[in-house]
Image (spheres, coloured by chain):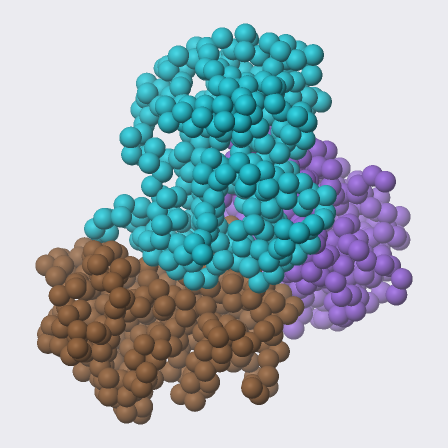
Chain colours: A purple, B brown, C cyan
């Protein structure tokens, strides 16, 4: 049997994703006890985290397991990711050795690695998470890489299903939001893929210059159509919002100016109106559409405080669901758990 | 049932505090097993810690629970504490979302947040810990805020009782000590409140300009008198020490110059003699008074090494008691624990 | 009964070391269950770690215990190590108090403290780890100090035994390797002591100016001879490699220029050929000698990538064995574990 990684939701079959979501719901209901005794998860955080760390650690603990948390460059060694590097510079440990060694201590690895370079043609290959998976003998879970944040995608899917019920034919708007920094595209791509899995009609609303990677558009469209949904891309934000069932505002940077923050900042300078307000919430279907966000969110910048604090916001449910989908994922990948009910 | 926070000792009834201390003693004797299985404590450290982190984590573990440790600005996101902020600056996550989300993962939250600003009229409102409590659905434990360090206060009370027995009529001197930095007043205020709970005769000895907040004096005096004790404030250090049963040296900064370190440094420039020496220990009641400190302590600056290493020092017992009072507090707030003996 | 520390392998009797190694093998085979329930290990990392932290934390967890991880100067207080310091500078907590307090929370302490100063005559006394042991009431485990890394030494010994079988009469070359930085000598000294424990014929190959401390040579030679082996020191790297059974390349700085990085860099400027290549692997006994390293390793600088990825490299086994020897060590020092099989 070969080991199985979880790096992008679309790399698992829709049936397997649905089985995960069903198991997550059973975890949430308190129906699954134990299953991870003597199991160790080694988490490698190359970037900060609140929800991810807290929810993974809690997920392992609740089922009897244990999560290690390593922070390269802080408490742990600065890591080299170039496979052919002559390591006479600042990096101390190669991810090849890190992956191999952690495979010996742990039953699964989980890695967070944001894009760092200035060349999207390199970063889009997602080498760090892919190489961790290549050199680890144990399953590798993506906790957000350059391209994907699939645990967030699972939580998005579970939350949308909980709040909208049957999602076929329902509309989700993934809306670009202004932000003081050029953020990665992993979350918006993963959110759209989650909506595609649910067979939703997806609109991506963004200003000129803020398209996701063409491969992401292809993957979202292919999965959406396979599942009975669709994808369109527009710059008419309010037109897209009219009658939508779910709004997912999210900031991301322009890939056209990747690694060039000054040019990127100029491109979005006049776009602070791309913000989720209560006026926009009222334009949703029946005025009752839901507002999603992966968190952390910039209050009153991406989403207004009254929206976040209001009854249509499901962002805290989304965050809670991170816990339950990860419990399911860990049980599936490394647990002593029977699928029989 | 509403949730219950532990932010300041004087906000709990004296009977409830006494019940906690009694339970702590039973924990220390090894009489309480389990009680926190499947319980998660989410700790948020905005400032460093050794004892607090180690003792909280151990407390959870010893009863079957688990403590998460998040460090905003290091491994976790920099946090915004202004409720109305337009978050277009450096902070990434608002404490409103942090509190709500951690409430979903954990059974209790615990927060350390030292004063950061330069305006005591703002800091004295203790907004960060109060807002965590406001936005968390689960009990919030104060691990030292701008105004209070109530877990330390509990440990102080337990330690004084263990060493002095009946504390009524006994005298404790909270003595200001010189230190290279202007430290917060949370610990001295909490120590005095602990002594007030014990009904002691409290003398606060400090140089001119080093008064605690007037509200702290009021709270200490009110509780002390309710419990049969008293409070006086003096600048006659050695006079206060003569015949005292307990000395609690502690450095703190002048609130008159809060946020103005140069002026503050000047005010204390000539005060290095405010230090606990073995000569001063000999002036205590029968030459056998105890020396307390919350730790970390500046050796040979706040307290001389021979005092710390001598038989009258109870500072390590105090630190140990942090563990036991926190076991009691956690069992009380979130434990499956029966009060019946 | 007095408590027992593990600071240097040669301070334990060879029989006790052999008993540890035998217990480690039983742990690795899965023969030892539990033994550390309700036991707490307090780890103090004054320097970074990946393997050490991950393997100690896993070791405690696998047997039912819990490891705390404190990082002075990061999440925890900056520590003073001078016993007589007047602490009016940058350090906040004295190791005397840290050791005493952690002794109250934990059943054992484990400390990592690399050499920091610029005076080898001071650093060679290994004061920080020795003072932790002096002021702790509980066993202290060395996780790498200025002089020794004995848990690594145990893992080295176990790995060599696993791969070479009967080690008597077999030859190990501890070979100096070029590195961009002047690293400590704790690992090479501990590796040679491990080989001495195994009764091997040890060659230390290093360029002029790169001798280990004379005390280390004495300790290695004494133990090697007691155990039927030998020590020689040479600058003829390839001569030493010819026919060797084990090669242990490792970078370390010149003690002649300790604390003087510019002079030290100059001394090693032309020595980049001191590197483990596949050519050199072919010169070993039957072309089948093993390659060891403590990790982290500088790929293509200390050891070529094809050697690390090839069948003669046992570096990942070594890293795995850190886990098993530490399980044995913890069971021995603080476990409820019976030696009876």
List x then y, in percent, for residue B240: 14, 77
Specify the quadrant of the image occupied by residue A268: top right
Q: Which quadrant does the N terminus of chain C fall into?
A: bottom left
Out of B237 and A15, give the one closest to the viewer.
Answer: B237
The answer, for residue A174, to whether it is visible in the render is no
Identify the residue shown where x is 36% and y is 69%. Answer: B318
List x then y, in percent, for residue A171: 78, 59
Out of C229 and A333, give the one closest to the viewer.
Answer: C229
Q: Is residue A234 left or right of residue C147?
A: right
Residue C243 versus residue C97 in the image, above or below: above
List x then y, in percent, for residue B208: 13, 70
Residue C234 versus residue C80 in the image, above or below: above
Identify the residue shown where x is 67% and y is 40%. Answer: C25
Identify the residue shown where x is 66% and y is 26%. Answer: C166
Q: Is residue A231 left or right of residue C300?
A: right
Out of A253 and C295, give the one closest to the viewer.
Answer: C295
Residue C54 versus residue A29 in the image, above or below: above
Specify the quadrant of the image occupied by residue C312: top right
Task: Report the number of discs.
Answer: 0
List x then y, in percent, for residue B317: 36, 68
Identify the residue shown where x is 43% and y is 54%. Answer: C2
The answer, for residue A26, to whether it is visible in the render is yes
């Amino acid at each position: 049997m070969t080991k199985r990684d979880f790096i992008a939701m679309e790399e698992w079959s829709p049936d397997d994703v649905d089985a995960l979501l069903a198991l997550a719901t059973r975890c949430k209901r308190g129906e699954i006890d134990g299953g991870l005794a003597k199991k160790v998860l080694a988490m490698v955080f190359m970037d900060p985290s609140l929800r991810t760390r807290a929810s993974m650690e809690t997920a392992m603990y609740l089922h009897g397991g244990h999560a290690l948390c390593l922070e390269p460059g802080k408490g742990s060694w600065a890591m080299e990711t170039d496979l052919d590097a002559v390591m006479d510079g600042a990096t101390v440990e190669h991810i090849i050795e890190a992956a191999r060694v952690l495979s010996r201590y742990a039953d699964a690895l989980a890695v967070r690695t944001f894009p760092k370079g200035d060349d999207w043609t390199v970063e889009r290959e997602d080498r760090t998470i892919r190489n961790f998976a290549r050199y680890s003998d144990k399953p590798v879970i993506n906790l957000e890489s350059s391209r994907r944040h699939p645990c967030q995608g699972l939580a998005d899917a579970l939350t949308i299903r909980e709040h909208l019920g049957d999602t076929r034919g329902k509309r989700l708007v993934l809306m670009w939001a202004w932000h003081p920094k050029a953020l990665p595209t992993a979350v918006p791509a993963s959110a759209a893929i989650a909506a595609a899995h649910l067979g939703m009609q997806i609109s991506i609303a963004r200003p000129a210059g803020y398209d996701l990677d063409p491969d992401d558009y292809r993957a979202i469209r292919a999965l959406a159509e396979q599942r009975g949904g669709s994808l369109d891309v527009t710059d008419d934000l309010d037109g897209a919002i009219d009658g939508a069932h779910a709004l997912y505002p999210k900031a991301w940077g322009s890939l056209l100016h990747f690694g060039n923050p000054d040019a990127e900042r100029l491109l979005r300078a006049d776009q602070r109106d791309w913000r989720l307000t209560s006026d926009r919430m009222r334009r949703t279907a029946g005025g009752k559409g839901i507002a999603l966000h992966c968190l952390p969110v910039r209050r009153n910048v991406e989403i207004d405080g009254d929206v976040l604090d209001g009854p249509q916001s499901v962002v805290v449910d989304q965050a809670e669901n991170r816990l339950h989908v990860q419990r399911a994922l860990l049980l599936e990948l490394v647990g002593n758990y029977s699928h029989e009910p």
